Image (cartoon, grey):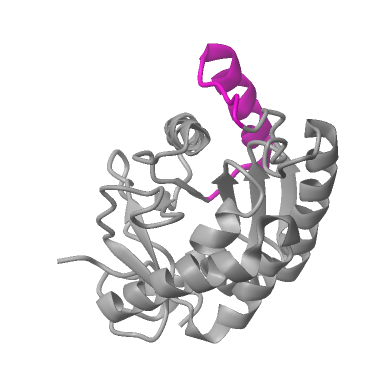
Amino acid sequence: MAGTLPALGLGGLAVPGAAHAASPDAPLHIVCIGAHPDDPESGCGGTLARFTAAGWRVTIVYLTRGEAGIPGKTHAQAAAIRTAEAEAACRILRATPVFAGQIDGATEFNHARYAAFIELLRPRRPDLIFTHWPVDTHPDHEVAALLGWRAYLALRPRLGLYLYEVDLGGETFGFSPNHYVDIGAVVAQKKAALFAHQSQHPAEIWDDYHREMENFRGREAGVQQAEAFVELTRLWPQGGLPNVLS
């Protein structure tokens, strides 16, 4: 039976003590990794909005700037447009954007890329990492997933690693969630962040994919709308996420 994230009021797991609560003096830090601008917003934008509202710091690390994502534009033109869209989306979510310097459609997972990615994340000292689910039709999503997993192993964020879906049945396959986040109260904020990516035809994507996905996950979790995750915190259990949002 799938579990739920206690930090977001759905119950089901042991809740750590108040020592994990975010505070203005020492806010806890989430790093969310996405292959392209709009991937993190699609997969866990509602969850990130809930955490920033609770006082957590959120950094979204975009592996690429979406260079290949606008037909008819050069890589430089598309990167400029999609970088601005990502920055606008992060303002809506109250997150900080960081760009990891790989190229859309030509991402790599090798020793040099792995080492550079770890050094990018290390000074940010994440308490929790979100990244893609690796079984995906887009190779950039697979690379982001592998880099996120390796970052988890290298940095050992004390509150774990959670994998998100992007497009169930279209790009994300074999995804069987064990955690859900109720995003009913922040759907409008998530939608606004997605609609900041105007180059990606957000109205069509929202109507055909993401609204259906969050409604489906909501039915699974017993709420109106939800986002779903697979937790891979297996090597050094920390007892689940802190109860900062209920």
Which corner quadrant holds the N terminus?
A: bottom left
Return the residue found at the far left: 1
Residue 185 lies, with reference to residue 157, above or below; the image says below
Residue lying furthest top:
111
Front residue of 154 and 194 = 194
| 218 versus 168 height, above or below | below
Out of 235 and 227, give the one closest to the viewer.
227
Q: Which residues are magenta?
A: 105-127
Could you tell me if residue 22 is visible in this image?
Answer: no
Which quadrant holds residue 98? top right
Most common SS among magenta residues? helix
- Residue 78, percent from left and from top: 79, 41
**Residue 111 is covered by the magenta coloring:** yes
Picture coordinates of residue 41, whole percent (x, y): 59, 60
The residue depicted at 68 percent of the width and 74 percent of the height is 192
| Residue at the spot 56% in from the left edge and 80% down from the top edge | 187
Q: Position of residue 120 (x, y in %)?
A: 67, 31
Report the label total. Answer: 0
What's the residue at 35%, 69% (across, down)? Answer: 180
Q: Relative to residue 178, is residue 25 drawn left or right? A: right
Q: Quadrant of residue 55?
A: bottom right
Towards the viewer: 29 or 68: 68
Residue at x 41% of width, y 63% of height = 241
Membership of 130 in magenta stretch: no
Query: Quadrant location of the C terminus?
Result: bottom left
Residue 202 in sight: yes
Q: Position of residue 18 (x, y in %)?
A: 47, 71
